[in-house]
């Protein structure tokens, strides 16, 4: 299993004194369960390393490799950067040569970050329709309005609803014009439902029925998100030729992950609903859906749960990823990062290695339950089957100033029951993961070839 970052500067310092329990490590991948120490172990989130193996490493100093003076300096700088919430230096030679200084933190923080997974997914769609966004934003703002107690909160909600209703009436023709021709009838039907729902929400507010506001808001935002998806006509770009034959998710899919929880009298099992975004991570999401269809994760245990991340995907035996039966080798996928404002992802390099310090990722590590791939510390293209979910912000991973963004491939968000991720423990069992929608968007599925 992968372990979390441990800042080992020299062999005379024990790892137990240097590990920050808030930072995930992978034995050899970020959050990949590795059978040895890795980048999150030495950087942030490596693959999983079996706990037994990690303990052996910690107890036997001879098994821990010595760190060079250069690595020691980088580890110290990295630790300092984490403490103040700044992006860290990469330990690769390329990063040393090309990027001698840390980026300006003020560049990375540009207003309150979006933390709601549904909102992140809506803004990640490859559309450009200002009219629908002007409906979406005030409906999302209701969440903040409801945090205000008493009458003032409902008054703020009422302003949000009126603004959204006004934007819908004024921009409806522009919204309809942005619908894909093949989906226009469905989109118009959704807009009609949205309009009726706005009136119902207005009545709820006038009746001062505070408890009914959030459920209606969720319903309306679902309509908005579906309208926005109806604006996407086809997959918007070509995946690079070298990855074109791999399983690709050309669109979105959703899965339900059923977990059996042990030793918790308050929670026996839980189903997590996860939306996978193939628009921004087609290779990464496609690889995962293909593995789900192979039932790769069914019966697998949670292999790491430390309050910072939950991680799984390390199969039994010496392999650290999925062994493709057709090749008898580990199937790996490239690091895949979609930069906000770009039309296609970048592959094989972190944004830091590319010098893109100011860039924002389309799928950021902002939400509780952000889902991403674990990988080896020094091998960007080593992800295979190990996945992790980020649990919560810490002093090391503040939203919009996150050491993980641009380093690891996010490909989805838990959108239902995400809070229960914090209750999972090592040894809890994934009973099943099932695709509940969007399977038709998977191309080149290897599970069909395998039978």
Image: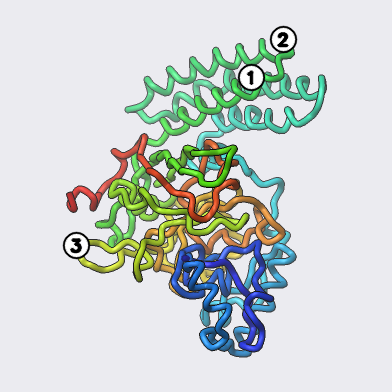
| Element class at badge 3 | loop
The residue under label 3 is 326
Q: Is residue 47 visible?
A: no
Question: Residue, x 69% and y 76% (percent of image)?
Answer: 17
Upstream in sequence: badge 3 or badge 1: 1
Residue at 49% across, 16% down: 193
Give above or below for 77 relative to 109: below
Q: Is residue 175 left or right of 100 when viewed as pictured? A: left
What element does badge 2 sit on? loop
Pointer 2 residue: 207
Q: Looking at this view, is 329 or 408 the one in front?
A: 329
Query: Closer to the observer: label 1 or label 2?
Result: 2
Residue 413 at x, y percent in the picture: 51, 44
Image position of 433 (left or right of 308)? left
Check residue 166 in the rendering and tell me which mark sits there, or answer none: 1
Residue 322 versus residue 425 in the image, above or below:
below
Q: Quadrant of residue 20?
A: bottom right
């Amino acid at each position: 299993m992968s372990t979390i970052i441990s800042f080992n500067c020299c062999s005379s310092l024990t790892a137990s004194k240097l590990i920050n329990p808030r930072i995930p490590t992978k034995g050899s991948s970020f959050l990949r369960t590795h059978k040895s120490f890795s980048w999150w172990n030495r950087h942030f989130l490596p693959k999983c390393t079996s706990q037994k193996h990690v303990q052996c490493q910690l107890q036997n100093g001879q098994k821990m490799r010595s760190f060079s003076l250069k690595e020691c300096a980088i580890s110290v700088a990295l630790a300092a950067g984490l403490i103040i919430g700044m992006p860290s230096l990469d330990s690769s030679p390329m990063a040393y040569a090309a990027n001698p200084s840390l980026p300006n933190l003020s560049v990375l923080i540009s207003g309150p970050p979006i933390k709601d997974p549904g909102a992140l997914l809506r803004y990640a769609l490859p559309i450009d329709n200002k009219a629908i966004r002007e409906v979406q934003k005030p409906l999302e703002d209701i969440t903040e309005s409801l945090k205000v107690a008493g009458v003032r909160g409902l008054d703020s909600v009422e302003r949000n609803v009126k603004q959204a209703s006004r934007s819908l009436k004024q921009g409806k023709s522009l919204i309809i014009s942005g619908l894909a021709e093949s989906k226009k009838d469905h989109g118009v039907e959704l807009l009609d439902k949205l309009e009726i729902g706005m009136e119902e929400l207005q009545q709820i507010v006038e009746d001062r029925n505070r408890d009914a506001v959030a459920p209606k808001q969720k319903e309306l935002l679902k309509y908005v998100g579906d309208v926005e998806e109806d604006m996407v006509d086809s997959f918007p770009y070509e995946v690079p030729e070298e990855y074109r034959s791999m399983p690709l998710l050309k669109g979105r899919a959703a899965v339900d992950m059923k977990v059996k929880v042990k030793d918790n009298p308050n929670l026996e099992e839980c189903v997590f609903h996860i939306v996978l975004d193939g628009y921004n991570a087609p290779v990464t999401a496609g690889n995962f859906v293909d593995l789900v269809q192979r039932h790769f994760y069914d019966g697998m245990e949670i292999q790491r749960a430390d309050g910072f991340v939950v991680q799984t995907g390390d199969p039994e035996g010496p392999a650290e990823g999925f062994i493709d039966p057709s090749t008898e080798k580990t199937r790996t996928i490239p690091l895949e990062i979609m930069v906000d404002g770009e039309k296609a992802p970048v592959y094989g390099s972190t944004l830091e290695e590319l010098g893109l310090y100011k860039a924002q990722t389309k799928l950021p590590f902002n939400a509780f339950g952000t889902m991403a791939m674990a990988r080896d510390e020094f091998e960007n293209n080593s992800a295979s089957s190990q996945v992790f979910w980020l649990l919560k912000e810490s002093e090391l991973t503040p939203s919009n100033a996150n050491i993980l963004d641009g380093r690891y491939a996010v490909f989805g968000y838990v959108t239902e029951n995400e809070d229960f991720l914090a209750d999972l423990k090592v040894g809890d069992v994934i009973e099943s993961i099932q695709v509940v929608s969007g399977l038709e968007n998977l191309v080149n599925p290897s599970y069909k070839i395998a039978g």
